[in-house]
């Protein structure tokens, strides 16, 4: 391979493709570290509130739709599988295969958001949206309201990340369709995939913390 | 650990095995939540969540085949999160 062909996708500041890929990958992991702390504030609030009001959290938990939450977890795990397979297909130069796997990832992502929407509508109907429409009555109504504040903030921030992920994957799908990637150059697919898997991991923790609460510590 | 190797191609069956493991852990975490284990419920739920996270990080996110630098960056965020949790709870648990 001529030197020019070897450096076709390498920016001038890098020695070679390996170094360029490693730098891109590290940049994404650094961004994900800041994302952990972005969600970390909400997880800390959860930790403190559950420590202070374990009974209220258990009461609020009875209002959660566990089957829908579990199905949504399965949907998101499947989207991570198609994502990983999509990166693999790009690495192997299977343009069409990669395109359809990324489309499948987007469809699973949208299915997740749709199911989440059904759950949100359910919560609105039951008067569990915090504020003046909060109609839940019980021994610890204020604390239960705080739980639902957290629930909507954590799942809402997660859903926002899902939307961003769907946007990124839509761009990746268009680029794949146009033949922008090859076994020599697929960094946007790989790095976009890291983001997608990260959002999946956030949900892996949200599911047991928000849906599967027992009254003990 | 393979230095700067960026083109590690993972066999399809590895990805399917990891996905199978993730589904099993999902079923397990729901099943365990249906029985009352006292304070062990939260321990089991979080242990399973961590196991699922490791499967995704190591295999789907390729960290298993990534450089030491990626390992450092990937664990760095969790270290800072642990500091956030510890300092906050050091206050609440000692009031």
Image: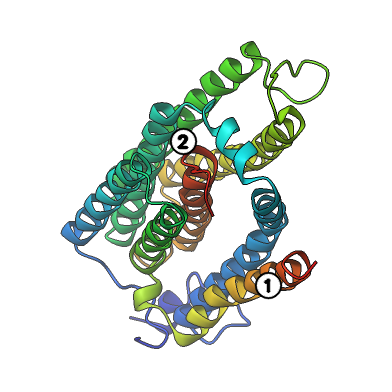
Q: In the drawing, what numbered circle is on residue B51?
A: none
Residue in the picture at 73% in, 30% down: A145
- Residue farthest to the right, as pictured: A132
Judged left or right of residue A168, residue A2 is left
Q: In which quarter of the image is the N terminus of chain A?
A: bottom left
Q: Is mark 1 on a helix, strand or loop?
A: helix
Residue in the picture at 53% in, 87% down: A15
Judge whether residue B77 can be spotted in this image: yes
| Residue in front for this viewpoint, A75 or A52 | A52
Q: What element carries label 2?
A: helix
Estimate the x, y position of residue A123 in percent, counting from the top left.
61, 20
Location of mark 2 (residue) = A109
Location of mark 1 (residue) = B86
Estimate the x, y position of residue B47 in percent, counting from the top left.
40, 62
- Mark 2 vs mark 1: give the one in front: 1
Estimate the x, y position of residue A81 in percent, counting from the top left.
32, 49
């Amino acid at each position: 391979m001529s030197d020019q062909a070897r450096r076709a996708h390498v920016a001038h500041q890098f020695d070679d493709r390996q170094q360029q890929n490693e730098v891109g990958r590290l940049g994404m992991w650094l961004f994900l570290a800041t994302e952990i702390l972005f969600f970390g504030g909400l997880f800390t609030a959860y930790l403190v509130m559950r420590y202070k009001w374990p009974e209220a959290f258990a009461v609020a938990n009875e209002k959660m739709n566990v089957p829908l939450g579990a199905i949504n977890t399965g949907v998101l795990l499947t989207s991570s599988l198609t994502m990983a397979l999509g990166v693999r297909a790009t690495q192997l130069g299977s343009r069409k295969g990669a395109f359809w796997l990324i489309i499948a990832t987007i469809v699973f992502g949208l299915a997740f958001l749709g199911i989440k929407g059904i759950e949100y509508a359910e919560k609105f109907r039951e008067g569990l949206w915090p504020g003046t429409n909060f109609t839940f009555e019980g021994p610890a109504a204020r604390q239960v309201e705080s739980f639902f504040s957290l629930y909507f903030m954590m799942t809402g921030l997660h859903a926002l990340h899902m939307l961003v992920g769907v946007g990124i994957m839509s761009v990746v799908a268009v680029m794949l369709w146009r033949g922008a990637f090859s076994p020599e150059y697929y960094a946007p697919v790989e790095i976009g995939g890291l983001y997608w898997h990260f959002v999946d991991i956030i949900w892996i923790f949200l599911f047991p913390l928000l849906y599967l609460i027992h009254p003990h510590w | 650990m393979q230095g700067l190797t960026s083109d590690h191609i993972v066999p399809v069956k590895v990805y399917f095995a990891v996905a199978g493991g993730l589904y099993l852990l999902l079923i397990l975490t729901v099943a365990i939540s249906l029985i009352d284990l006292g304070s062990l419920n939260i321990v089991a739920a979080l242990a399973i969540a961590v196991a699922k996270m490791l499967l995704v990080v190591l295999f789907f996110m390729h960290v298993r085949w990534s450089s030491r630098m990626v390992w450092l960056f990937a664990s760095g965020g969790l270290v800072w999160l642990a500091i956030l949790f510890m300092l906050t709870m050091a206050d609440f648990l000692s009031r």
